Amino acid sequence: MKNSPKYYIVDASALPEVFLKVAEAKRLLATGQAGTVNEATKITGISRSAFYKYRDAVQPFQKMNVSRVITFQFLLHDEPGVLSTMLTIFAQEKTNLLTINSITPSNGCAIVTITAETTDMVVTLDEMLHMLSSTPGVIKAEVLAG
């Protein structure tokens, strides 16, 4: 009988350094920051054999699902271009927007909820939240569900 793979959720700080470097090398390749495995392994300081040994076993948690739908909520200043800038970030990071909902602005602020399919997203969820929350005009950015 074939053994089924077992999966564990482990805090990154508890993992051996080689696993973290393999994950980083995979991210460099996925984002185009490294064009080849050789380049990615040189940047991360691991051998190509270590990369090939662990590449299929090391996955970021948010990449484990075949499909990933996440609902974000934002508190925005009611200013021209804020939402447009955010939507550009979603497009650049390869998300597929499913819904956009907005409450009529009051007191110079608007609440916007965006649901996105993130299977092909090229950054981590934390990086995405950081980019969105750093956008001028964004007061607060958070994940509601997903």
Image (cartoon, rainbow, N blue to C red):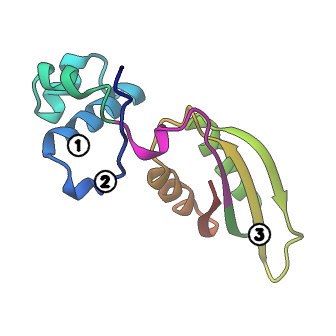
Q: Amino acid at mark 1?
A: Leu
Between 140 and 48, the residue placed more toward the observer is 48
Q: Say if 16 sits above or below 120 in the image.
A: below
Image location of residue 18, percent across then percent down: 15, 38
Q: Earlier in the sequence, mark 1 or mark 2?
A: 2
Between 127 and 83, the residue placed more toward the observer is 127
Farthest bottom residue in view: 107
Image location of residue 68, percent across then percent down: 61, 41
The label on residue 10 is 2
The label on residue 111 is 3
Q: Amino acid at mark 2?
A: Val
Query: Secondary structure under badge 1?
Result: helix
Magenta part of the chain: 59-72
The label on residue 12 is none
Which residue is identified by label 1? 20
- Label 2 close to label 3 by CB (< 8 Å): no
Query: Secondary structure under badge 2?
Result: loop
